[in-house]
Amino acid sequence: MADYAGPIQELIDAFGRLPGIGPKSAQRITFHLLKVDKTESQRLIAAVGNAIEKVRFCDLCHNLAESELCSICADSERDQTVLCVVEEPRDVVAVERTREFRGRYHVLGGAIDHLQGVGPEQLKIRELLGRVQSEAISEVIVCTNPNIEGEATALYLTRLLDVPGLTVSRIASGLPVGGDLEYADELTLGRALEGRRVMER
Ligand SMILES: [Zn+2]
């Protein structure tokens, strides 16, 4: 593909580094932005700047938040005794959509994946253990993705969270294997939550 002059190529390269955007799409978005009305592109710049400035991670569960605590952790109506452990903030959205869960979350920031160099210490696992030891939690539902990495993470957490009086459960199978939680429809995910099974240590 031909190279363009300075700022154009810089923008193409920047878009090309985003997930799911190949060189052709990066080029298409760049030329679209340069062609449209300036107020339109300024609105995009403002939205990106605003989100980057305002959004942070929740101090407690590591979900996306706009202040120290996310809206779920700050909600005293939520069940304080149950934690749903997920890989990414987008999985919180997927579980919330089922309307089957009234507890709170813990976002790991990924799954254990030794091939990609992701071990427990790269994830918010120490923080999870800390919460289980310091908060009055009776159940941890491991809601990691139904793939190799998600299952390995679930097994690791089950062994680690060997705390008296704590139940560790895993969402039921029935979700498309190898898929991501976020692609499961609400009904399927809701049923998987409801049909969770206790993990034997
Ligand atoms: Zn939170």
Image (tube, rainbow, N blue to C red):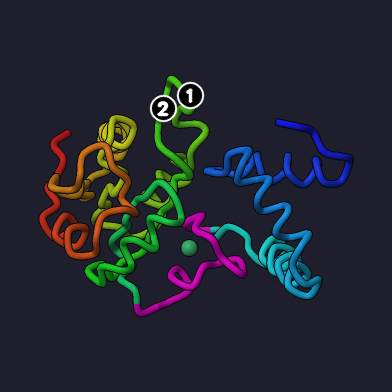
Quarter that holds the N terminus = top right
- Magenta highlight on residue 63: yes
Q: Which mark is residue 170?
A: none
Tell me residue 128's x, y (percent).
Answer: 42, 47
Residue found at x 76% / y 62%: 35
Query: Would residue 111 be counted in the magenta stretch?
Result: no
Q: Which residue is mark 1?
A: 116
Dot 1 beta carbon under 8 Å from ligand 1: no
Magenta segment: 60-77
Q: Residue at x 48, y 44 (%)?
A: 109
How many numbered marks are there? 2
**Which residue matches tag 2?**
113
Image location (x, y in percent) of residue 2: 76, 32
| Residue at image point 78% right, 59% down | 34
Q: Amino acid at mark 1?
A: Gln
Q: Amino acid at mark 2?
A: Asp
Verify CB contact (< 8 Å) between mark 1 and mark 2: yes
Q: Position of residue 155 (x, y in %)?
A: 26, 32
